[in-house]
Amino acid sequence: MAQPSSSAYPSSLDSAATLGSDQVNAKTFVLKTAVNTSATSIVTTATISGFAVNNWILIDSEVMWFTGLSTTTASNDTMTVVRGQDGTTAASHAVNAIIYTPPVAGWANQLKR
C-alpha cells in the first residue's frame, strides 16, 4: 500500500470558524418534563423546527427513533419516539436534559460500537 501524497492532507488546521462546519445541520432541544423508562412522548421546551420525523435522537446515552410530532402549546411540541434503539436501553431522563439530533445522535451511536 502506497503512502498518501501531501495532497491527501488538509492544507491547514481547522479554525474556530470551520471547526463546527460539519455540525451545520445539528439541532438541540430541551426536555420540558422528566421522562420515565416507558414514556413514548417527549415534551420539548420549544417548537421543533428544521428537523423532520423519522430520524434518530439522543438523550443522555439513549438512542431513540423520532416518529411523530404534535404541537402541545404555542411554545412546546411533543415528539413521539421509539425507545432504546440500536442496542441502548430505555432510561429515565430529567427535566432540561438535552435532546440531540443528527449528526450528533449519529456520531454518538457510532462511538459506542
Image: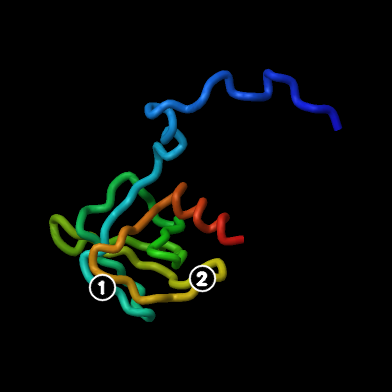
- Quarter of the image for residue 37 reads bottom left
Mark 1, Cα crowd under 10 Å, few <14 / some 14-19 / many 20+, is: some
Q: Position of residue 79 (x, y in %)?
A: 32, 63
Which residue is located at x 29 percent, y 54 percent? 29
Q: 112 or 51: nearer the eye? A: 112
Which residue is located at x 26 percent, y 58 percent? 30
Q: Is residue 45 left or right of residue 24?
A: left
Q: Position of residue 63 (x, y in %)?
A: 46, 64
Q: SS for tag 1?
A: loop
- Quarter of the image for residue 34 reads bottom left
Q: Residue furthest left?
A: 74
The residue tagged 2 is: 88
Question: What's under tag 2, amino acid-wise?
Answer: Thr
Mark 2 / mark 1, whichever is N-terminal: 1
- Quarter of the image for residue 15 reads top left
Q: 106 or 82: nearer the eye? A: 106
Which residue is located at x 55 percent, y 66 percent? 86
Question: What's the mark number on residue 102?
Answer: none
Structural distance between the alpha carbons of marks 2 and 1: 19 Å
Which residue is located at x 13 percent, y 56 percent? 74
Q: Position of residue 96 (x, y in %)?
A: 24, 63
Q: SS for tag 2?
A: loop
For residue 104, above or below residue 22: below
Q: Position of residue 25 (x, y in %)?
A: 40, 40
Question: What's the mark number on residue 34?
Answer: 1
